[in-house]
Image: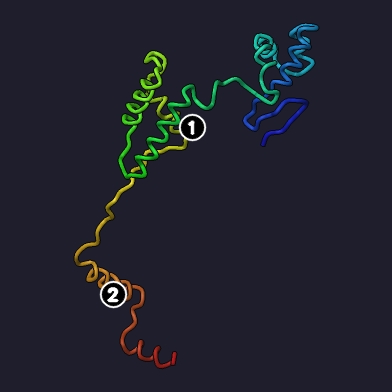
């Protein structure tokens, strides 16, 4: 469980997570005095202070609750993602099998329609996996045929029932008659 201690979110995994608001406070303190004094005052490493000073402009422009800069979480080519996702869902509804190779070819086709150069968008296997994760897609195949029953399944079922009765209830006919007589 995570807990907050003086502007710092302490992670249950052992590390600490700082939001951009806290980082800006530390950077301002470092600029007014020194990196090492700000690090001691706010109980962070001096290495972090140096990194945050280099990121100062990005931190000021970021959301105050943002914790890191990891790039866009929606993908760089959102229109391609949207169209490919639509294509895949249509084909899955029709019962067509979809593979990653088909998804990659469709993405390249859409990129060509949108005039995106091939050196910018390659539709790699990594892109395909990330796009599928972003949009909640999976490549499970739907089968239209169920496994058929064997031709002599009734006979096999009856023999199995007899086996179970004889194995777990070894009562002879006379005992069965007496049991039935007392149960009435």
Are the residues tagged 2 and 1 within 8 Å (C-beta)? no
Q: Nearer the viewer, residue 41 or 167?
A: 41
Q: Which residue is mark 2?
A: 162
In the figure, 178 relative to 43: above or below? below
Task: Specify the label residue 110 is tagged with.
Answer: none
Rendering quarter of residue 51? top right
Identity of the residue drawn at 36% across and 77% down: 169
Q: Nearer the viewer, residue 122 or 13?
A: 122
Q: Is residue 86 left or right of residue 56?
A: left
Residue 144 appears at what percent x and percent y?
29, 51
Q: Nearer the viewer, residue 180 or 91?
A: 91
Q: Is residue 40 left or right of residue 86?
A: right
Q: Earlier in the sequence, mark 2 or mark 1?
A: 1
- Find numbered disc 1 in the image and state the secondary structure of the residue it sits on: helix
Residue 45 appears at what percent x and percent y?
70, 15
Q: Which residue is mark 1?
A: 134
In the figure, 122 relative to 184: above or below? above
Identity of the residue drawn at 42% across and 15% down: 120
Residue 5 appears at what percent x and percent y?
76, 28
- Locate the N terminus by quadrant: top right
Residue 160 appears at what percent x and percent y?
28, 70
């Amino acid at each position: 469980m995570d807990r907050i201690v003086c502007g710092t979110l302490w992670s249950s995994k052992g590390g600490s997570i700082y939001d951009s608001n806290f980082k800006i406070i530390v950077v301002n303190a470092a600029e007014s005095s020194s990196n090492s004094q700000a690090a001691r005052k706010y109980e962070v490493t001096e290495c972090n202070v140096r990194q945050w000073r280099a990121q100062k402009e990005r931190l000021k422009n970021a959301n105050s609750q943002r914790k890191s800069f990891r790039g866009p979480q929606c993908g760089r080519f959102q229109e391609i993602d949207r169209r490919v996702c639509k294509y895949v869902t249509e084909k899955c509804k029709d019962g067509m099998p979809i593979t990653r190779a088909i998804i990659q070819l469709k993405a390249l086709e859409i990129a060509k329609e949108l005039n995106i150069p091939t050196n910018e968008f390659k539709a790699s296997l990594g892109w395909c996996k990330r796009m599928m994760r972003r949009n909640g897609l999976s490549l499970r195949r739907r089968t239209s045929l169920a496994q058929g029953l064997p031709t002599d399944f009734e006979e096999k079922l009856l023999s199995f029932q007899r086996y179970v009765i004889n194995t777990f209830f070894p009562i002879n006919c006379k005992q069965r008659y007496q049991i039935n007589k007392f149960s009435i």
